[in-house]
Image: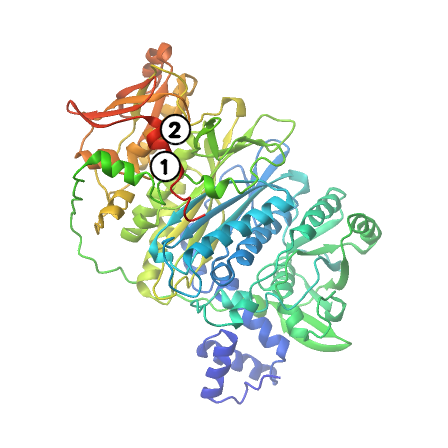
């Protein structure tokens, strides 16, 4: 029993610290329980502590999320920002389901387990909507791979995070098809692990993360409940302290061998129409899942906590209630359907227990061995405080900065190609099974055998009976967002949008995973709000809905991370046989630069290499992006290959097109605006490279209108020839360049 009614300020401060709450929040609790005329029980105070954590109730962000992101829907969205994942119409009968979330703090403490359970949790978010998970996505942000300071070396963190994602996804049989990897010393010891999942479901089989039916049985199924993951959400809602051993106990333990049959059992039960409501047991465990699902449906419940199946027989009631043990689902079913559910679960070897029933009442009641241990208003348990955090625009002197040019362009480019943020991701992605299930049409790598290159977006065919596909891409540009949160977020969204277009798809929906530092820092909150404003403006200008999201604060150790809004974009393609890929398709075809490459190196990898500090970022031109979209759609039939200009700039985009083929490139950049380094390495603007079939060039030019189009060269038999004003900047065999690009991560993974 926590004695808070007569607690002194010092005692309340001590309790607040142990529970992950603030002193002011403890005063709120004291006032509440004074009104009830009693002190809280252990389970009540623990339930409130996890329910009021930043991770669970979004107390620092919900005010601004509602202000900027409300109403970003479209006529084809089914559920957005209401349940555990977004549900979007795919065709007349089917919908796709998508969600992305971070698992940052656990991955910093126990990289393998943290990353693996991030994958497991995001699969359950999609499963609980009644959908079959069909694809996984991961966007990862690591420190300098040469960093050896801290409790764990960066190389250890990188390898174990990748192994955790690999082992979980491969063992559960869901392909990991898309994502991104970024390296920056700001993430030393504080990795960001953003895991996403896409599922497919019949529209009439969508399940809600709520229950509004009185008298339903409440069931926990799947894995047993243990002490792993206790206080996980509290741990994820504070500044990281890697030296605190108690943090390790907050990391959950995943088990994909249980998850795979659990998926089959849940889907079979859902197809039979047995499930009335469903939620996964993730952050906050039973405490969050039960409270949120009941409250959302206007119900409450009576819970018999001693009926929960346990790994550890000597667990305290409050530990059972807040444990975040993995591979568990929470269901509501009509008692008359129990026998059917029992048959299905027995067939798949799934354990389950009936832990209570729904009732029409404002209060949730929990009993343990016939003793009432919790009796509280659900509105209070699930509400949590709401903060209007102070925000302040960072005081930075705005000045134009000019990056110096390299002494030798050839030498610089050869060295640049092997840098961690530029080189191939083969060492990471080839550990993932991205072809299992047989529905990955455009893979993370594309091109000729033994001459593959990076795809702009992955394309999957989620339905056996249809050629319609989904394009998937994910990533962020934190170096740009760190300079200017609004325009940096816009440029991040531009890149994702172009990735979908260059794959032959039409952008269709957006999911955000927002990774920031301390929300109590006014400058952090300003950047957060500017990011939200950018997302809102982008969605309203393009008509693309924001369908789901996640906020992760307190990502810092010695210093805050760069603001990192990771954006997952999905597009639709009517026929996967019309998809476009990056690699050059033939010799002698004209190469065009469509759109604008802004002659500015702010936020670029070139600028990072040169050590230049930029304080200004050019605006992103949405009207130009929309014109690019219209022109690309009209001329799609004449295009052989496309590639967006992004990380590394024009030079890297050109080389990646050549790396995936047996052909070369002969290009002249004389007519492009800007200095030589800006032309080659700028990552800003709407620029896309387009290879056109030579015999259809005239038709292409007639159809491509409304946006700047510049012919910069042709594809060739072999080699890369890049010149400006009559002099060669680079003249090299493709294989020489390719070897440097391919092997950049070899010494780290």
How far across and down, in percent of the image, does residue 714 sit? Answer: 30, 18
Looking at the rendered structure, which numbered label has been put on residue 741? 1
Q: Nearer the viewer, residue 43 or 680?
A: 680
Label 1: which secondary element: helix
Of callouts 1 and 2, which one flags the residue occurring earlier in the amino acid sequence? 2
Q: Residue at x 34, y 57 (%)?
A: 186
In which quadrant of the rendered image does the N terminus lie?
A: bottom right
- Mark 1 Cα within 10 Å, few/some/many (few <14, many 20+)? many
How far across and down, in percent of the image, does residue 177 sit? Answer: 52, 39
Task: Give above or below for 362 relative to 597.
Answer: below
Residue 706 in sight in this render: no
Report if the CB atoms under discs 1 and 2 are less than 8 Å apart: yes
Which image quadrant is residue 544 in? top left
Q: Nearer the viewer, residue 133 or 272?
A: 133
Q: Residue at x 16, y 43 (%)?
A: 404
Query: How did the renderer colour the structure?
Result: rainbow
Question: In the displayed structure, does residue 256 sit left or right of residue 58?
Answer: right
Task: Give above or below for 741 relative to 520.
Answer: above
Q: Nearer the viewer, residue 437 or 627?
A: 437
Looking at the rendered structure, which numbered label has been put on residue 659? 2
Residue 280 in sight in this render: yes
Label 2: which secondary element: helix
How far across and down, in percent of the image, does residue 229 sit? Answer: 59, 65
How far across and down, in percent of the image, does residue 571 sit? Answer: 48, 34
The answer for how far apart the CA atoms under marks 1 and 2 are is: 9 Å
Question: In the displayed structure, does residue 447 sit left or right of residue 676?
Answer: right
Task: Give above or below for 575 relative to 21.
Answer: above
- Mark 2 Cα within 10 Å, few/some/many (few <14, many 20+)? many
């Amino acid at each position: 029993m926590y004695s808070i009614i007569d607690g002194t300020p010092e005692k309340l401060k001590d309790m607040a610290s142990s529970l992950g709450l603030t002193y002011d929040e403890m005063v709120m609790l004291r006032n509440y329980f004074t009104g009830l005329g009693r002190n809280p029980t252990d389970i009540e105070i623990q339930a409130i502590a996890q329910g009021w954590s930043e991770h669970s109730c979004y107390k620092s962000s919900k005010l601004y999320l509602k202000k900027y992101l409300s109403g970003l829907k479209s006529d084809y969205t089914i559920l957005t920002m209401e349940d555990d994942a977004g549900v979007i119409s795919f065709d007349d009968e089917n919908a796709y389901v998508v969600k992305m979330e971070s698992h940052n703090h656990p991955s910093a403490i126990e990289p393998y387990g943290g990353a693996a359970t991030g994958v497991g949790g995001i699969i359950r978010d999609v499963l609980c909507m009644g959908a079959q998970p069909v694809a996984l996505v991961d966007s990862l942000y690591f420190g300098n791979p040469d960093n050896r300071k801290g409790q764990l070396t960066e190389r250890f963190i990188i390898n174990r995070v990748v192994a955790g994602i690999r082992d979980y996804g491969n063992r559960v049989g869901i392909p990991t098809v898309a994502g991104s990897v970024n390296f920056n010393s700001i993430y030393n010891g504080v990795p960001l692990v953003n895991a996403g999942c896409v599922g497919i479901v019949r529209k009439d089989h969508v399940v809600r993360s709520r229950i509004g039916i009185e008298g339903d049985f409440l069931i926990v199924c799947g894995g047993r409940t243990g002490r792993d993951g206790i206080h996980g959400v509290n741990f994820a809602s504070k500044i990281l302290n890697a030296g605190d051993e108690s943090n390790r106990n907050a990391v959950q333990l995943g088990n994909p061998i249980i998850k795979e049959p659990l998926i089959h059992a849940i889907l079979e039960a859902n197809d039979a129409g047995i499930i009335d409501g469903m939620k996964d047991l993730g952050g906050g465990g039973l405490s969050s899942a039960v409270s949120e699902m009941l409250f959302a449906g206007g119900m409450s419940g009576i819970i018999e906590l001693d009926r929960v199946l346990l790994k550890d027989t000597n667990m305290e009631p409050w530990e059972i209630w807040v444990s975040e043990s993995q591979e568990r689902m929470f269901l509501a079913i009509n008692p008359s359907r129990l026998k059917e559910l029992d048959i299905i679960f027995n067939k798949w070897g799934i354990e389950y227990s009936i832990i209570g029933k729904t009732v029409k009442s404002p209060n949730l009641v929990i009993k343990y061995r016939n003793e009432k241990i919790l009796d509280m208003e659900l509105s209070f348990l699930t509400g949590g405080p709401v903060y209007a955090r102070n925000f302040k625009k960072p005081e930075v002197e705005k000045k134009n900065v000019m990056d110096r040019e390299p002494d030798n362009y050839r030498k610089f480019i050869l060295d640049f190609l092997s840098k961690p943020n530029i080189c191939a991701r083969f060492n990471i992605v080839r550990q993932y099974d991205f072809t299992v299930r047989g529905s990955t049409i455009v893979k993370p790598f594309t091109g000729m055998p033994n001459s593959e290159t990076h795809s702009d977006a992955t394309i999957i065919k989620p339905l056996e009976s249809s050629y319609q596909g989904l394009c998937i891409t994910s990533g962020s540009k934190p170096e740009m967002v760190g300079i200017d949160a609004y325009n940096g977020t816009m440029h991040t969204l531009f890149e994702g949008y172009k990735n979908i277009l260059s794959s032959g798809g039409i952008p269709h929906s957006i999911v955000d995973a927002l990774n920031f530092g301390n929300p109590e820092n006014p400058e952090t909150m300003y950047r957060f709000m500017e990011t939200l404003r950018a997302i809102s403006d982008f969605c309203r200008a393009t008509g693309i809905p924001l369908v789901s999201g996640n906020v992760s604060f307190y990502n810092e150790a010695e210093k805050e991370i760069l603001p990192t809004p990771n954006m997952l974009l999905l597009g639709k393609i009517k026929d996967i046989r019309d998809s476009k890929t990056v690699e050059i398709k033939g010799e002698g075809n004209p190469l065009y630069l469509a759109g604008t490459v802004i002659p500015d190196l702010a936020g670029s990898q070139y600028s990072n290499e040169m050590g230049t500090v930029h304080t200004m970022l050019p605006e992103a031109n949405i009207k130009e992006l929309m014109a690019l979209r219209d022109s690309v759609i009209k001329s799609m039939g004449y295009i052989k290959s496309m590639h967006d200009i992004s990380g590394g700039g024009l030079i890297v985009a050109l080389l990646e097109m050549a790396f995936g083929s047996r052909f070369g490139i002969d290009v002249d950049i004389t007519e492009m605006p800007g200095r030589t380094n800006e032309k080659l390495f700028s990552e800003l603007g709407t620029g896309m490279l387009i290879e056109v079939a030579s015999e259809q060039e005239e038709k292409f030019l007639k159809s491509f209108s409304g946006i700047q189009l510049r012919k910069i060269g042709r594809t060739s038999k072999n080699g890369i020839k890049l010149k400006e004003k009559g002099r060669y900047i680079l003249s090299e065999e493709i294989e020489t360049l390719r070897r440097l690009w391919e092997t950049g991560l070899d010494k780290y993974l």
